[in-house]
Amino acid sequence: MEGFFAALVISFGVIFVAELGDKSQLMALTFATRFKPIPVLIGITVATAVVHLASVAIGVGLGAVLPTDWISLVAGVAFLGFGAWTLRGDKLTEEEKRKAEKTSKTAIVAVSVAFFLAELGDKTMLATITLATKYGWFGTWLGSTIGMVAADALAILVGRMLGRRLPEKTIRYGAAILFAISGLWLILEAVNELT
């Protein structure tokens, strides 16, 4: 159970941080201006659960064939890359905004499809794959899904309270720093395992 709990907590924290200021978080805000928050969160949850289930399957497969010390090293470098990616920031394109605002389908279906497509190849998907190679599938899947939904729920709540004015630059820098710390920690672990 300790392995499950560690996977749950670590993946929750990493994905929560990764989602801060991410494009899909901006999509959540956009959908929340058109639909009620609960259907938006249900749609986010469905899409996230499916994408992250695929991510952990890939991660577990990689973890089974690669040595763990090298996985830690690659994961550490990947997390440093995620930190740089976070510093760059994400913005919704005008087309993505129009799709989110003009959808005529039900909120849950519209949000689910939009989030599913937005998350394919996104840093949260890649981070989930990376975590699953090290921590196992179920705890990583559950923690990453809850972490992403929690971050998007926070964006919706704060966005509605502050009139959609989030301190994006501060959030981006904070998330990048946390990724860098995680990356350095994993690299240090890998170096200790290799020596």
Image (cartoon, rainbow, N blue to C red):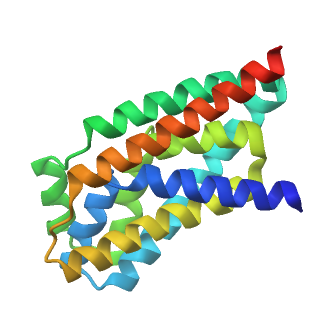
Residue at 52 percent of width and 44 percent of height: 125
Is there any visible trace of residue 86 in the rendered image? yes
Give 135 or 108, whichever is nearer the viewer: 135
Residue at 33 percent of width and 82 percent of height: 37
Residue furthest to the right: 1
Give 145 or 57, whichever is nearer the viewer: 145
Quadrant of the rendering where the C terminus is positioned? top right
Residue 185's place in the image compared with 174, above or below, is: above
| Count of numbered tags | 0
Relative image position of residue 72 (x, y in whole percent):
70, 28
Residue at 75 percent of width and 38 percent of height: 134
Residue 29's place in the image compared with 33, above or below, is: above
Residue furthest to the top: 195
Relative image position of residue 12 (x, y in whole percent):
59, 59
Quadrant of the rendering where the N terminus is positioned? bottom right
Q: Is 92 placed left or right of 77 in the picture?
A: left
Q: Is 116 placed left or right of 131 in the picture?
A: left
Relative image position of residue 64 (x, y in whole percent):
83, 30
